[in-house]
């Protein structure tokens, strides 16, 4: 069991804990210096994903339209490739 934990953590549990504490302090200092907090970072990530979703799919109608447009090419190509594969047997 100890070997599993050592392998999973990449070192001894105490050594890993010390490294995580030191890295956390450094990252915390950097974020404080940049005047950022976890809430701002999470909010930024959520807003970025919302913007990307709206940019790509503006609405459900556009998402369905993109799906049908792509399927008009992908499905026939898939069927033809499967038929050609069967024909080679």
Image (cartoon, helix red, strand yellow):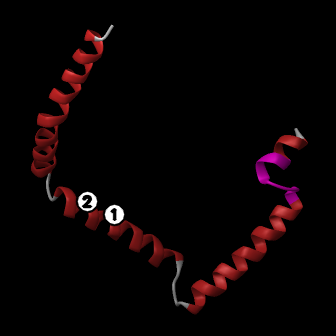
In the rendered image of this protein, does residue 78 appear above or below residue 38?
A: above
For mark 1, what is the residue? 49
User: Which residue: 41% across, 69% down?
Assistant: 45
User: Which residue: 10% across, 45% down?
Assistant: 65
| Bounds of the magenta segment | 6-13
Which image quadrant for residue 75? top left
User: Which residue: 59% across, 88% down?
Assistant: 32
Percent x, y of residue 64: 13, 43
Q: Nearer the viewer, residue 78 or 43?
A: 78
Percent x, y of residue 54: 21, 62
Q: Nearer the viewer, residue 88 or 82?
A: 88
Question: Left or right: where does residue 75 sit relative to residue 39?
Answer: left
Which image quadrant for residue 28? bottom right
In the rendered image of this protein, does residue 69 appear above or below residue 31?
A: above
User: Which residue: 86% across, 57% down?
Assistant: 13
In the rendered image of this protein, does residue 60 appear above or below residue 81?
A: below
Position of the C terminus by quadrant: top left
Q: Classify mark 1: helix, strand or loop.
A: helix
User: Which dot marks residue 78?
Assistant: none
Position of the N terminus by quadrant: top right
Which image quadrant for residue 77? top left
In the rendered image of this protein, does residue 75 appear above or below residue 67?
A: above
Q: Classify mark 2: helix, strand or loop.
A: helix
Question: Left or right: where does residue 23 sit relative to residue 65?
Answer: right
Question: Left or right: where does residue 62 sit relative to residue 38?
Answer: left
Crowd rating for badge 1 (residues with CA inside 10 Å; few <14, some 14–19, many 20+): few
For mark 2, what is the residue? 53
Q: Determine the CA span between mark 1 and mark 2.
A: 6 Å
Q: Nearer the viewer, residue 77 or 59?
A: 77
Magenta stretch mostly in which secondary structure? Answer: helix
Callout 1–callout 2 Cβ contact below 8 Å: yes
């Amino acid at each position: 069991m100890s070997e599993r934990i050592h392998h999973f953590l990449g070192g001894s549990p105490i050594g890993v804990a010390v490294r995580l504490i030191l890295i956390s302090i450094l990252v915390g200092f950097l974020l404080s210096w940049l005047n950022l907090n976890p809430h701002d970072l999470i909010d930024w990530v959520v807003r970025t994903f919302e913007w990307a979703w709206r940019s790509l799919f503006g609405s459900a109608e556009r998402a369905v339209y993109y799906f049908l447009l792509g399927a008009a090419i992908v499905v026939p190509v898939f069927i033809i490739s499967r038929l050609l594969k069967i024909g080679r047997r």
